[in-house]
Image (spheres, helix red, strand yellow):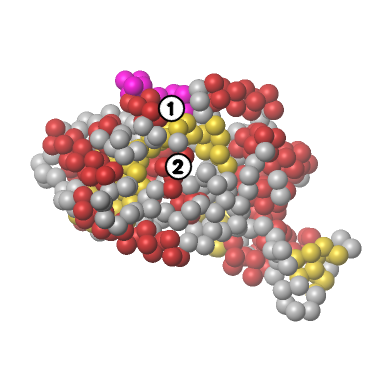
Amino acid sequence: MDDRPKIGRSPTKGSITLNDEQRLNWLRLIRSENVGPATFRDLINHFRSAGAALEGLPELMAKNNSGRRIKIASRDIAEREMDTAQKCGARFIGMGEPEYPSILRNIDYPPPLLCVRGNTDIFKRTSIAIVGSRNASISGTKITSRFASELGQAGVAVVSGLARGIDTSAHRHSLVSGTVAVFAGGIDKIFPEENHELANAIIDNDGLLVSEMPVGWQPRSQDFPKRNRLIAGLCEATLVIEAAKRSGSLISARLANEAGRSVFAIPGSPLDPRSEGANWLIKQGATLVTNPQDIIDDLLVTTERSNILDESEDLFSYQENSTQQLIDGKRVNTEKGNAKIMEESDEEIRTRIINALGPSPVEIDDIIRFANATPGQVQMVIVELSLAGKIERHSGNRVSLI
């Protein structure tokens, strides 16, 4: 009998279930030109639904004659993508649905929709990203096989990018225990092509293929940082094995560190360029590891702490509080005991919100307090400035004027 402590996440607290029409509207909105995860969230916060956002965007854009234009994806385009996904055995899950990985919701601007193929039960498990060189050495491949195998046996799901070298070894040696492959292109565009058989084996062994890119999208070099962000976001920790100094693996490590996740690295020879990145990470504070048990022990502590502290937030953090109501067209704030009707004009509030912004990044909550405005009012101004190309977003839900 295996009496080792089990590593796993607390159950995902889904707050929504999208019907077919809502899912299609979400897909149309996120596939619209110049709409990324941040703008998607802003629009949902303001319009309260993707369907309402699609209807209201033309009028909103009419108020902003300059700046970025949003070309709304047609219903036909979205329906074709859904049909193509279904034909290859994939489906879309939305942020806030029970299947959506709870840990991914904790990064800045997570993808609203994931296209998945396989068994999403693997999202319930603690995960580690194993990343490294495409041009892996024999030693690096052996180390990867050992770590991936033993971590999998301990109940940890291995996540990687299906690339040659370290990624391929990580997936192959965690097939039986379950592994997640994250794509830089569409869910139907396996890259490199030589890993078709491996991708099918991942699915056959209750693993999962994941992408946030459109179905049919051919991966480009500029798409891989987005993939690396998703890899790091899906995991409690990241392990770097044999990475060059300018490797994409270091992007995953940096993003994991910025998100407060553990970063591990295996040291290598100072004479091997493939070890420069991992050795540099260790000098920067990454945890040096030589044994899989070091990571398992850390993940046990990390997972126990996160499960105790896990408090699932609302799907979108800037929705109006339930204590605020509309009375005769005027906003009433009931949080302060006595109802106070805010009769100021929209222009006065807008001016205060813009005055709260500047070239230095500020948190949205600070803008709300400074401007004495509701979250919805602040969000509306941010949406308008975003469409006009006048605002820049930063980590930690901060914004600044450009």
* Residue receiving disc 1: 219
Residue in the image at 17% along x and 51% along y: 291
Task: Mark yes or no: residue 24 visible.
Answer: yes
Residue 311 in picture, x, y percent from top left:
52, 62
User: Which badge, 1 or 2, is on the more N-terminal residue?
Assistant: 2
Left or right, residue 331 beside residue 238 = right
Left or right, residue 142 beside residue 213 = left
Mark 2 lies on a secondary structure that is helix
Mark 1 lies on a secondary structure that is loop
Task: Specify the quadrant of the image occupied by residue 10.
Answer: bottom left
* Residue receiving disc 2: 121
Residue 308 is one of the magenta-drawn residues: no
Specify the amino acid type for callout 2.
Answer: Asp
Q: Residue furthest bottom?
A: 337
Residue 96 in picture, x, y percent from top left:
58, 49
Give, as a single range, the part of the protein colored magenta: 186-197
Q: Residue furthest right?
A: 328
Residue 15 in picture, x, y percent from top left:
61, 52
Residue 194 is one of the magenta-drawn residues: yes
Residue 310 in picture, x, y percent from top left:
48, 61
Specify the amino acid type for callout 1.
Answer: Pro
